[in-house]
Amino acid sequence: MSKLLVISCDCHAGALPAGYKPFLDREFHQAADAWWLVYAREMMARMGTFFDQEAADTYAEQAGNEGSGKFQKSAISAAQQASDEQLREFLSDPDSSIAPRRGEYDAAVRLRELEADGIAAEVIFPQMAPFGAGLMMYRHNVSPAQRAAGNRAYNRFLADLCQTNPGRHAGVAVINVDNIADTVQEIRECHAMGLFGGVLLPASTGENPFYHHYDHYAPLWSVCEELAMPVHTHSGWSPDYGDVTAATPMYISEVDMWAHRPFTALLWSGAFEKHPDLKLIFTETGCSWILETLRTLEFKANNPIFAHFTKELSLTPREYFERNCYIGASFLPRHEVGDRHRIGVDKLMWGSDYPHMEGTWPNTMEKLRETFHDVDQGEIRDILGETAVEVFAYDRAQLRQAADRIGPRMEEITGTAEKLAVA
């Protein structure tokens, strides 16, 4: 039987600060330089509170020497003591101990590392970009003009990266919601540039209305439906809880919740009802949470006291989820794959979270065996790639050529060969 077609529906890419400048309007260069210094010092100050150092050291050993030093205590200490000019050099030097991995912005390195992991195609979400564009939209105090400029710079960088291997990188455009007419235009331009992965919906809307305000966001839902651009939520945003001891565990505890919230907004506002072809995808937010959420929403929808909530809705909450939604099941753990039938096998799309430390790269085959070793083979094929082909309209023939060359064999995941050898 043919090798598995594996698509990671959760990967990340981002440039060095200097790498965004060709795509950033010149009038914002000076402000962006200043912003990167503030952001870098904030992140370095908090680095020791986020990852267990032993786990970070292990990851650095496995990941190789291309930027892996950013998690090492000595590298962070040296950068913390650097002058502004020295820190600017660190941030612009690809060999710096605090630089991101080359695969995050170097297409050749990226493809080599993905293929070594058995991955034929990917969906790309942002790393940090100028003025906080991406997962942390509205976390940083910048002007609407700076937000828009940062978004444009990231989207154009990403389109350029994706075009090095056309058809294999589904880039997800970043947007803000300060001016919906401008946002719609940016989405159209991103689609024209070849970013077919969809649109990242900010988890926070700042001072703007939230997504339950249908009239405000109708043009956004309409253009995404028209262009078949899925709308994504992705964990990453939370309020800034400061530097107290509990700030980071608070972030870790709530980060998924902020990315779940748009579902109920689109449900009760009628967005799913009015836009039946709109796709909403929850990525790196867990999987099994949707079961209790749907149980609660079904209870409320069926309660006669709340009948007025559903008078303009033709489907149940579960039916809207089944028609409009998918889950980007990042580094799908063993305890959640057991809920696949209750969630819907056809709703799940696996992701490696490349190149993040909490993901499966560069040990993807080991992690896939842990999760899928006794799962039905047809379900394995669907979750690892076949569903994503349909959702993102990949060219199946093109990806099949890549999969036949670098994809894993089914028995590498199910352990069939080992079982036969023992027998």
Image (cartoon, helix red, strand yellow):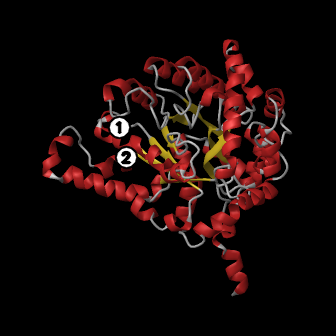
Residue drawn at x 82%, y 49% is 74
For numbered disc 1, what is the local secondary structure? loop
With 83 as the anchor, is 281 left or right in this view? left
Kindly tell me whether residue 67 is visible in this rendering.
no
Kindly tell me whether residue 225 is visible in this rendering.
yes
For numbered disc 2, what is the local secondary structure? helix
The residue carrying mark 2 is: 323
Cα gap from disc 2 to disc 1, whole angstroms: 8 Å
Residue 116, by quadrant, is bottom right
With 275 as the anchor, is 57 left or right in this view? right
Residue 284 position in % (x across, y down): 54, 50
**Which amino acid lies under the numbered mark 2 shown in the image of this protein?**
Arg
Count all numbered tags in the image, as a single digit: 2
Residue 119 position in % (x across, y down): 69, 52
Q: Name the residue at the left extreme.
A: 304
**Which amino acid lies under the numbered mark 1 shown in the image of this protein?**
Pro
Q: Contact, CB < 8 Å: mark 2 with mark 1?
A: yes
Q: Give the label on residue 91, or none.
A: none
Residue drawn at x 55%, y 40% is 393
Residue 265, by quadrant, is top left
From this view, report whether residue 321 is shown above or below residue 268: below
Quarter of the image with the C terminus in it? bottom right
The residue carrying mark 1 is: 276
Quarter of the image with the N terminus in it? bottom right
From this view, report whether residue 113 is shown above or below residue 17: below
Residue 216 position in % (x across, y down): 35, 24
